[in-house]
Image (tube, grey):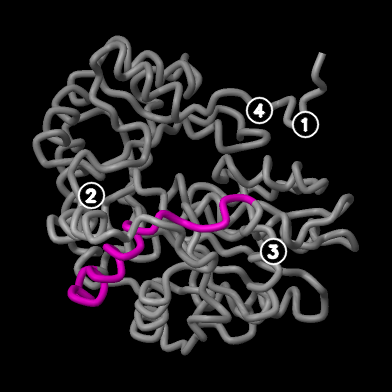
């Protein structure tokens, strides 16, 4: 018998619910991906570069043209000048960037603080590095950092804190004042950060994203992870990047070169072309996705779900207590999929220890208008 290094890990809930949606013909609002294509010019650029012969290995750190565009975008968005050669690394997906950052930093016996509910790749990455996750629940109902609990969780073995803003699954945002508070809390300690900011351009209602890239003190000890897939509606391209100070980037690259070595070459060329020609794309994203959020929420007003509009991401949480208080959120998600034709994600799966009587499910609104209308019509009949 093989002794598993990840004995508690099975098939993810995202795979399970997407498979169930396919089997039942349900509208899939579970897994976080658009049901529409990325920009036509971006897609056409891939074919152009494939036919131009750009099909061999890219540099390990990413194509210079793409890293240059990332550096320019960071300067425009956050006012930080980063060295494209020493601080920007392109990876096959943000998940790989997070994995490599964790492997670069975490040693056997180290502790890593994560905020529950949290994305499911964090803990396996830590465990494979020999570390242990310390779970700090976010305060309900707003999923805010509980600063006393965070302070209590920090100990002599704390090596890393993983932030996620905008936050999956809740959409909650970390403010600049909270980043200042975090800086004060860890200032005298050797604690590093992974800041998962893959939804950085999906922030609504006129609020600006508070990036660790724009925080001078925190950036000096941080890996900041972003996603081309989320930003350009091409999640299947599995292409992301990580920005970190030179010394941290050097350690991450030591791991990255032996995990995948490099990302897919023609995709990087296409992204570089599109970012150069259309820098306005990221500026237009908040309004683009806010319109989808507002449509979906307006349509759900006729349902028995209760909710507060998501401040960010392309996810909307909804409380179903008035519908089936007798069902756990996992059973509710299965029931909605099988009996009412809409697949969703239970929020409890993002927790180590879910709060008692949690009655929240997560809907993805990165969908065409007709998809959202059809789904909402079904949900209003529940």
Which residue is the site of mark 3? Answer: 254
Was residue 263 drawn as part of the magenta stretch in this picture? yes
Whether label 3 touches label 4, CB < 8 Å:
no
Determine if residue 324 is in view: yes
Whether label 1 touches label 2, CB < 8 Å:
no
Which residue is the site of mark 2? Answer: 293
Between the C-alphas of marks 3 and 4, the distance is: 26 Å
- Count neighbours of disc 1 (C-alpha within 10 A) and say few if under 14, some if 14 to 19, many if 20 or more: few
What segment is highlighted magenta in the picture? 259-281
Q: Quadrant of the C terminus?
A: top left
Whether label 2 touches label 4, CB < 8 Å:
no
Residue at left 49%, top 34%? 347
Depicted 133 relative to depicted 107: above or below: above
User: What is the x, y in percent for residue 71?
Assistant: 42, 81
Q: SS for tag 4?
A: loop
User: What is the x, y in percent for residue 165?
Assistant: 48, 61
User: What is the x, y in percent for residue 244?
Assistant: 59, 75
- Count neighbours of disc 4 (C-alpha within 10 A) and say few if under 14, some if 14 to 19, many if 20 or more: few
Q: SS for tag 3?
A: helix
For discs 2 and 3, the disc positioned in front in the rendered view: 3
Q: Quadrant of the N terminus?
A: top right
Which residue is the site of mark 4? Answer: 9
The rendered magenta stretch, by its main secondary structure, is classed as helix
Which label is found at residue 5?
A: 1
- Give the mark, 1 or 3, whose residue is nearer the N terminus: 1
In-image side of 371 versus 62 (left or right): left
């Amino acid at each position: 018998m093989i002794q598993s290094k990840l004995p508690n890990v099975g098939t993810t809930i995202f795979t399970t619910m997407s498979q169930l949606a396919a089997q039942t013909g349900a509208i899939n609002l579970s897994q976080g991906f658009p049901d529409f294509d990325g920009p036509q010019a971006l897609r056409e650029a891939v074919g152009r570069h494939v036919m131009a012969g750009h099909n061999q290995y890219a540099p390990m750190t990413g194509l210079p043209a793409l890293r240059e565009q990332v550096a320019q975008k960071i300067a425009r968005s956050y006012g930080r000048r980063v060295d494209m050669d020493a601080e920007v690394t392109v990876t096959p997906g943000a998940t790989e960037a997070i994995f490599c950052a964790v492997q670069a930093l975490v040693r056997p016996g180290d502790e890593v603080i994560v905020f529950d509910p949290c994305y499911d790749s964090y803990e396996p990455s830590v465990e494979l590095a020999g570390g242990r996750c310390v779970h700090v629940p976010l305060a309900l109902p707003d999923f805010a950092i509980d600063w006393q609990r965070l302070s209590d969780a920090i100990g002599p073995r704390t090596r890393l804190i993983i932030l996620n803003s905008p936050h999956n699954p809740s959409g909650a945002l970390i403010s600049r004042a909270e980043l200042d508070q975090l800086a004060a809390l860890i200032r005298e300690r050797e604690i590093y950060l992974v800041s998962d900011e893959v939804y950085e351009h999906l922030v609504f209602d006129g609020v600006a994203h508070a990036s660790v890239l724009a925080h001078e003190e925190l950036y000096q000890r941080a890996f900041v992870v972003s996603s081309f897939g989320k930003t350009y509606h091409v999640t299947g391209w599995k292409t992301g990047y990580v920005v970190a100070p030179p010394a941290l980037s050097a350690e991450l690259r030591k791991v990255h070169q032996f995990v995948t070595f490099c990302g897919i070459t023609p995709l990087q060329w296409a992204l570089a072309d599109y970012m150069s020609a259309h820098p306005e794309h990221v500026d237009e994203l908040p309004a683009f996705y806010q319109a989808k959020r507002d449509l979906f929420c307006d349509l759900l007003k006729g349902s028995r779900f209760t909710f507060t509009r998501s401040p960010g991401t392309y996810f909307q949480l909804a409380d179903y207590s008035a519908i089936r208080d007798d069902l756990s959120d996992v059973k509710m998600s299965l029931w909605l999929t099988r009996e009412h034709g809409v697949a969703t994600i239970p929020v409890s799966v993002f927790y180590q220890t879910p709060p008692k009587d949690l009655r929240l499910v997560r809907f993805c609104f990165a969908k065409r208008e007709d998809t959202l209308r059809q789904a909402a019509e079904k949900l209003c009949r529940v």
